[in-house]
Image (spheres, helix red, strand yellow):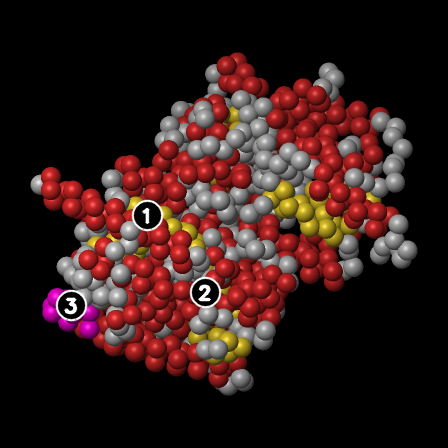
Amino acid sequence: MTTAPAQAGAPTPAAIRYQGTVHELQKELMSAYYRDLTAIAEGGPGRSAQLLIAGNPVEILRTFDMIPVFPEVNALQLAVRKVSLPFIQKAEELGYATDNCAYVKADIGLWSSGGVAPFGTIPKPDVLVCNYVGCNVYLNWFEHLAELTGAPAMNVDIPFLRTPDGKPTDADVRYVMAQLEELIALLGRITGKPFDEDKFRLIVERSARVGELWSRIKELTKRRPAPYDAYFDSVTMMAPLYCLRGTPECVDFFERAYEEMSGKAERGEGPLPQERFRIVIEGPPPWPFLRAFRDLFSRWGAVAVASTYSTVGGLWEFGFRHDPSKPLESVARHMLEANLCNRSLLQRYQQIERYVEEWGADALVIHSVKSCRLFSAGQGDMREHFVHDRETPTLLIESDLEDPRYFSHAQLRNRIDAFFEALEQRRITAGVTA
Amino acid sequence: MTVDLASYRDVIEDRDYPTVREWRERTGGKVIGCFPVYAPVEIPYALGMLPIGLFGGGNRVEIAHADSRFQSFICSIVKSTLELAFVGKLDVVDGLLFHSICDPARNLSSVMERNFPERPPVYVHLPQNMTSPHAVTYLASELRRVGGELARIAGRSLTNEDLLRSIAAYERVRGLLRDLYALRAGAPERMPTGELYILARLATLTDPADSAPILAEALEDARRRDERPKDRIRVVLVGSFCEQPPLELIESLEAAGCYIVDDDLLLGWRWALREIAPSGDPYLSLARAYVDDSAHLSTKHDLRRPRAQALIESARAHKADAVIFLGAKFCEPGLFDYALYRKALDANGIPHLFLEFEEKMWLYDRIRGEVETFVESMLFAEVPVP
């Protein structure tokens, strides 16, 4: 039975236009970002550094006028444009296994093909900064990139949040700050520039402002209806958040995004004509089939009011802000404690519990992806916890974030339809009982 | 004392951990389960506790509960270790030691904590920036913190003297293992890898005061052996640093025509390349040895010396004819390394073979056939192998 949406008068997905002003602006900004990278790749002036999304010290790189390049973003761009598979297969020909992270394989395949992608050309990095923030694959990934590119490399080792109080120790903070000083010295040698502390403070101030605006935008989805989808529309805002953080363009983008989203909230507008279910989504999206995946939820009037994926690079909604009065320490603390990747699985359970309670969600959807075991390993236990300890209706579905071979549309549709049918039935029963 | 390999074999295969239970009863001490790859075992031992290696259920435990917590694409050792806890086999331990070797192991620590709070995991952060001058002092401070957490489980305080004595006890074991490995590399016919593995694995379940005499006796026995070398190729085995292949599989590699002259089996229990002096600040000594003087592990990322280079050096130093990569299914760190190993081995003209195993497997004919074909292709090659 999959007739419930039509009975409820929900539109067909084809009629829904998900794009808004923020989406258009994001496209412009990201096109300009990749134009800049292509110019460097083609011999133009400027320097680039590769680093990773999860809790990173991009403010330091920006101080040295280095453009950050994120291999995860490049990989997902390949997937969104539905061209990731040949790059993945290229890496598999080189000896990478089917069980290796497909983000890495797509990126290695891209490098082995000269770095030329449909959205731009990736320059050979002047430096590789592996911000080891929880994800162990990051370390492997950058070892391989170091071998492929011959670029100088540094691991910035971020101790995992592992103590009973869930906080970094004083020794952790000192250790990370000491390594950031080493990074500053390395970048100074590579660029030949002194470290401009005033400029660093200004850039950190911009990150603080963006953190504040992003946090306010996230707060808006507590409203009914939520003015935007905190999973599918958040990923749109995450691109400038990560690729452009520390720049005036990023601040401007988030000023305008807040304006647009708060306007929608005031007018009572949501991303769908009717918000019937409020859900929390855990896990990265299936980039090769993003639209098709979204439609599977839209047809049920399901809107994400919060998502864990939108916190991979930074967790601002619970209060963290960069601090221009302590710029280096705040960058260190961001890397240590204010991003999903460096927090334990149990801390993620707590994060989701807050979303369910404070954002008023009806259910949890766990999207388990084979590539990213940091996210997925143990999600069966997460389901057990939410179903049995928290009595939160929970759906666990599987595909992949990059490899299109793991996406089964029919199977996902059956699971999602069955889940929302059961939720609807539960509502009807509860109404009768009441 | 005689070396009773048959009974040691029973000990390492028994997931009821009979000798650990016996130790517990005899001493009244507590037990700390250490998930691979490397754990600072000296610390719990200094606190009067017995650290033991947890290497999953092998092919002796059927996974019935853990499959619902970890997906099908997660390696077996994560699930079988959790299964051991679900079926009560881990009631022999009072606490656990975990560290960041890979993402599934990291998350297993959390799943264990939620489901079995009576056996709290203590999580060690091992540094991954070996080029930082701060790595050693940081690790020393981390080991002190871990000592504090373990002291709460032990119910007593930890002194430097206790820790120095513990380092000395483990150094005795590691030194004997180094000697056994060196003996095998020089004369592999005297020390079959199956035997060496049983001895090394036994040491992960035994008080070092008890395992050292056994290893010493085994070393003497091996030195006295007069075996004629067989017509086999010399092989370096890599890829089995965490989940362990079944013992029968290791034996069948040898039976297929290989002398294994170096391997990374149980490497986290014999990681120190040289003796750690039991003097001075014990935390600093352990930290310095780990950062600057330890074996290359797939889970230790040292930009000063890439692992592929270390593998080539090992193959050359051990006069190996070939390298066999024996990787655990779904083991990401190992599988990533294989891509780099393959490139380096090809570049250096070293023949290599890729094999995949799961701890729960119990049929070895296919792998044995592959190895036999590989060995024959080398033994009977027209062109001498470089």
Query: At which x and y percent is residue B233?
Result: 82, 44
Letter of the chain that mark 3 sits on in the rendering: A
Q: Are marks 1 and 3 in contact (CB under 8 Å)?
A: no
Which residue has dot 1 on it? A395
Residue type at mark 2 is Glu
Q: Secondary structure at mark 1?
A: strand
Picture coordinates of residue A175, whole percent (x, y): 44, 53
User: Which range is magenta?
Assistant: A260-268
Vertical position of residue B67 compared to residue A201: above or below: above
Rendered-image quadrant of the C terminus of chain B? bottom right
Q: Chain of mark 1?
A: A
Q: Quadrant of the N terminus of chain B?
A: top right
Residue pointed to by mark 3: A269
x and y percent of residue A323 in the render?
A: 28, 63
* Residue type, label 3: Glu
Label 1 – label 3 distance at C-alpha: 27 Å
Q: Is residue A409 left or right of residue A92?
A: left
Q: Is residue A422 above or below residue B208?
A: below
Q: Is residue B142 visible?
A: no
Residue at 81 percent across and 40 percent down: it is: B257
Q: CA distance from mark 2 to mark 3?
A: 32 Å
Q: Main secondary structure of the magenta part?
A: helix
Residue occupied by mark 2: A72
Q: Earlier in the sequence, mark 1 or mark 3?
A: 3
